[in-house]
Amino acid sequence: MWKPLTSLRIPRPRSSDLLLAGGALSLLLAFTLVAGLPVLNRLEAAARLAALRGNAATFQLAAESYAARNFGTYPTDPLDLVPYLPGRRAPRNPFNGDRVRFREAPGDLTYASPTGGKDYVIRAWGFGPAGGSRVLVTLTSSGN
């Protein structure tokens, strides 16, 4: 005959068993954290690079929009493109969250028109191997 579940008695675990299980769980969590940090760092770096590429592409679209309204001439000053950006504001720097300042610093963009409005070069800057700035993305126009 079956007994109802209410009549079953589960033995109370000993404190030494609880201490052993808690220690094992702590070791497992610590190992997961230590093993997961490099993966998390790589994911964050990839996300920053993707955001930087997106900023450069958005700036390129602004340059092309400017040229479409100005008979194929690109601006010589990057600030002339700000009205063509979403929200009429510079994009956010993925490394520090500030607005892009158009300088050669990690997370910023630089814009130049070497031929005085006939073309452009957009560079997206990131961290170099020694911690300095280096170009990660370069976008150019095809020219007239």
Image (cartoon, grey):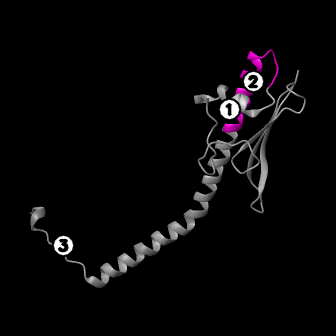
In the image, which residues are magenta?
55-74
In the rendered view, tell whether residue 12 sits above or below residue 53.
below
Look at the numbered disc 1 and give the secondary structure of its residue.
helix
- Where in the figure is residue 99, as x and y percent of width and height? 62, 42
Q: Is residue 57 magenta?
A: yes
The Cα–Cα distance between marks 1 and 3, rounded to whole angstroms, is 64 Å
Q: Residues within 10 Å of mark 1 (few under 14, many from 20)?
A: some
On residue 58, which mark appears? 1
Q: Which residue is mark 3?
A: 10
The one nearer the camera, 119 or 1, is: 119
In the rendered view, tell whether residue 13 sits above or below residue 110.
below
The amino acid beneath tag 2 is: Glu
The one nearer the camera, 20 or 90, is: 90
Q: Is the C terminus in the top left, top right, bottom left or bottom right quadrant?
A: top right
The Cα–Cα distance between marks 1 and 2, rounded to whole angstroms, is 10 Å
- Where in the figure is residue 132, as x and y percent of width and height? 77, 58
In the rendered view, tell whether residue 80 sits above or below residue 56.
above
